[in-house]
Image: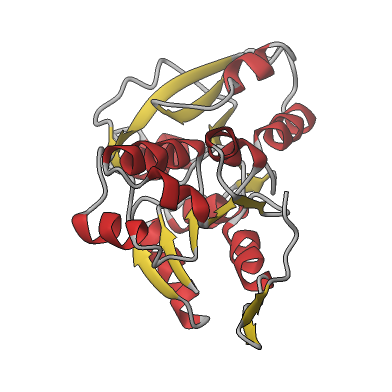
Amino acid sequence: MRLIVTRPEPDGARTATKLRALGHDVELVPLLRIEPVRDVDLGGGPFAAVLITSANALSGVASHERIAELRSLPVFVVGRRTAETARAAGFPNVTSADGNQRDLVRLVRERVAADGPKPLLYLAGEDRSGDLGADLAALGLPVRTVVVYRAAAASEFPDAIRNALALGRFDGVLHFSRRTAESFLRCASAGEALRPALSVTHYCLSSQVAEPLVAAGAAAVRIAPRPEEAALIELVNAVVVTSTNGGINERADER
C-alpha cells in the first residue's frame, strides 16, 4: 500500500523503515517537530519516582544537570517503546504500564504509597491529553509536572504530498497522536486537499487519536487493538488488498 506516516522524527523514520520492509510504499511526513526545553527547573525533590508518557521526554532531560539523580529513581512509563528508550538512556529501574494513561495511573497507584512525603516527578510535554497529575493527586499521590519538551505543528504539507493526496495516490495514513491527526486536517485544509485526504483509510493508535478524523468525516478510520507501534503496523497488514476481477478485497476490523 501507499502510506503516509505523520509521526515526528526520529520515531517516524523507524516506523517508515518497518513498513517498507513489509513491502509498503511509504512517505514520511512529520507533522510535529519535537523541541526539548533546556535547563528546566525540576523542583527541590527528593522525588519518589519519575513518570514518563512519551519517549520525547527523555531527550528533553538527556543533558540536564540532575540527570544522574533522575536515573537513580524508579521510572514508570506508559508503554513498552518508551520503556525501551528509557533503559537505553541509562535508566535501569523502568516499569511499563503497557497501555494508556489510565493504565499508568493504576500501575503507579499499586506501586507507590499514597500520602507519602515524596512527590512524583512527571516529565511532560507542553501539550497533553488528559491530566495525569490531577488523576494521581485525586488518589493521594502528589505530582510535580515539569514540561521538558514541546511539539511545534506543521502548517502545510510539502507540495509533492499535497498534490499526491489531491490526485488520490495514497491508500492510507498512520496517526500516532491526536495532535498529528489535528495537524493533518489543518494541513489538508490549507492545501485545499481536505476531501481527498478524508477519503483514504486512517490508521490510528487509539480512539482518542481518531476522534478529530471521525469528527471531520473521514471515510474509513481503523483503530489499533493496543496503543503501541507494533499493533498499529499489524493493523495495517491486516488489510489484505488483492485484485480480483478488477475489484479490491479488504479484511480488517473497522471501528
Task: Please tell me whether residue 244 is drawn above or below residue 166 in the rendered image.
Answer: below
The front one of 64 and 24 is 24
Q: How many marks?
A: 0
Residue 87 shown left or right of residue 7 in the figure: right
Q: Is residue 45 visible?
A: yes
Q: Residue at x 69, y 45 (%)?
A: 99
Estimate the x, y position of residue 141 in percent, counting from the top left.
67, 16
Task: Please tell me whether residue 144 is drawn above or below residue 176 in the rendered image.
Answer: above
Residue 81 shown left or right of residue 96 in the figure: left
Q: Give the quadrant of residue 74.
A: top right
Q: Residue furthest front?
A: 245
Q: Residue furthest right?
A: 110
Task: Please tell me whether residue 19 is drawn above or below residue 77 in the rendered image.
Answer: below
Q: Give the quadrant of residue 243.
A: bottom right
Estimate the x, y position of residue 239 in percent, counting from the top left.
66, 71
Q: Is residue 118 visible?
A: no
The front one of 56 and 13 is 13
Residue 225 shown left or right of residue 144 in the figure: right
Q: Residue at x 51, y 57 (%)?
A: 200
The front one of 146 and 213 is 213
Q: Residue furthest bottom?
A: 245
The front one of 83 and 167 is 167
Estimate the x, y position of residue 116 in percent, counting from the top left.
69, 15
Estimate the x, y position of residue 227 in percent, counting from the top left.
64, 49
Task: Please tell me whether residue 53 is drawn above or below residue 203 in the rendered image.
Answer: above
